[in-house]
Amino acid sequence: MKNSIKILGLVILFFVGITNINAQKCTSEKDPITGETTKKADAVAIFDWEKGVSVTFNKVSEEYYIDVVIGIAGYSGDILTSDDEFIIKLADGKIITFKTKENVNPILMPYARSSYTCKFSVSKEELQNMAKSNLTFIRFSISNKTFDLTPSEKDKKRIVKAATCILQ
């Protein structure tokens, strides 16, 4: 019983932490070995009770990429493959599609959740589009199962701020 209460408390803290990501901040670090400068914007979490994503924008030297953590309800043994897509639609009608370069195995989380961590290359032009136009819709697929998310107005602003921050 005490373990259940502790776990429930941790889950509540996790969700409170995710929902309190307000200001978009960029941090820059210089790799002590390679000397490359890495710039990273705070994560933006978009979720409902069945599924969710956390998006982090990054820049290493002159290359841009996004880290996406996908979470879904239920324990899934499905592998995210190069056939699976992560699609975002912007308010101006532009659609950006990302595909994984390698297979991604799920990580099984407490309370019957599966999590996938992916890294996608993104062009400067795609980032500029995300900085100019709100993200209106997210769709991702895992082994022929499709999941849709509509970000809140607050999340839309956070994505624009994160993309803008990385471009500066």
Image (cartoon, rainbow, N blue to C red):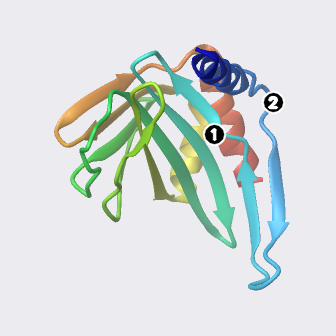
Q: Residues within 10 Å of mark 2 (few under 14, many from 20)?
A: few
Mark 2 lies on a secondary structure that is: loop
Q: Which residue is mark 2?
A: 23
- Identify which residue, 134 or 87, lies in the foreground: 87
- Identify which residue, 50 or 135, lies in the foreground: 50
Please, is residue 70 above or below residue 93 in the view?
below
Q: Amino acid at mark 1?
A: Ala
Q: Position of residue 147 (x, y in %)?
A: 31, 27
Q: Amino acid at mark 2?
A: Ala
- Side of 116 where 14 appears, left or right: right
Residue at x 66% of width, y 26% of height: 14
Q: Residues within 10 Å of mark 1 (few under 14, many from 20)?
A: many
- Side of 20 where 131 appears, left or right: left
Please, is residue 50 above or below residue 54 in the view?
above
Residue at x 82% of width, y 53% of height: 27
Please, is residue 98 above or below residue 13 in the view?
below
Q: Residue 131 bears which disc, if any?
A: 1
Mark 1 lies on a secondary structure that is: helix
Q: Is residue 1 visible?
A: yes
**The N terminus, quarter of image:** top right
- Residue ranking furthest to the left: 144
- Residue ranking furthest to the front: 1
Q: Position of residue 108 (x, y in %)?
A: 41, 41
